[in-house]
Image (cartoon, rainbow, N blue to C red):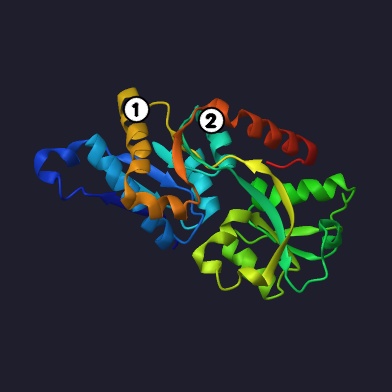
Amino acid sequence: MIRTVVITLLLLLFSGNGFSAQQPVRFGVFPFLSPKQVLQIFAPIARKIELDTGRPVQLHIAPDAITFENKATEGSYDLLWPNNSTYFKLHKKFNYQAIVSGTPSFKGGVIVRSDSNISHIGELVGKRIGGTLSHSYAGYRFLFNELKAMGYTSPEDFIISQASRADTVVYGVLSKIFDGGTLRLDSIEADNFAAVRNDIKIIAASPAVPQFPFVVHPKLEKGLVEQIRTSLLSLNDDERFSPVLQRLRMKKFVPATDMDYETFRKLMTSLSKQHDLD
């Protein structure tokens, strides 16, 4: 059975001074990479939060995006790093609030093999297309909306297969499983794609998308929320965390509020109403 990995960090180290007696902060992370890679990125962040707040942190790493969203929308986490779509659902259902985001923003886009004759997204009609998840703007909805706007409204016109992760999309395109793929474009700048980057070409790009936010449950104590925010922002000045920011495809963390996501939320809501997407 596939289960969410739960790691309580530093719990034994501090068990002698009452640290472990406190209620742990349940920290859920969107599985944008493999569980091992997510752990490598977020375990240091969780440790820093523990040290700065004096509270134990349970790091929850779901095996896939669907499991993560199901757990998140059940209200299972106190602190999260969700994708934007899940955040909007959490804000609407539970009033979760954004406290920190990152810069710069990113874009979704459409890729094909570099030797492909396809040069325009309209040429993907009737072809095999790989995407991430249907609620992802960068990895699904952008292309879906563009094709619908061109008048391709029949189910026979196109099907975007949900490949879940960016690496599945990229290698699916390269191996000709897919004729084209849609994904977050900065994901192909990752080191693991360095050897194949010249083998793909970008034929379309979306408007800017805000970085995924760190969000908190409304019942989390205000003092603790501010400590967590301060802890996250302090990572900008710690050179040890430069690789972490790079792997998150950010230059720095910045303070955030729900209003920072209002424009993009309206866009996503509009797309959902137009095309019955949830």
Q: Nearer the viewer, residue 100 or 253?
A: 253
Q: Report helix, strand or loop for mark 1.
A: helix
Q: Position of residue 149 (x, y in %)?
A: 85, 44
Q: CA distance from mark 1 to mark 2?
A: 19 Å
The three-letter amino acid code for the residue at tag 2 is His
In the figure, residue 225 lies in which quadrant? top left
Which of the two discs, 1 and 2, sits closer to the camera? Answer: 1
User: Which residue: 13% across, 38% down?
Assistant: 18
Q: Nearer the viewer, residue 238 or 69?
A: 238
In the figure, residue 132 lies in which quadrant? bottom right
Specify the quadrant that holds the C terminus.
top right
For mark 2, does the 10 Å Cα neighbourhood hold few (<14), some (14 to 19), or many (20 or more) residues?
Answer: some
In the figure, residue 188 lies in which quadrant? bottom right
Q: How many marks?
A: 2
Q: Residue furthest left?
A: 16
**Looking at the image, is 110 positioned above or below residue 232?**
below
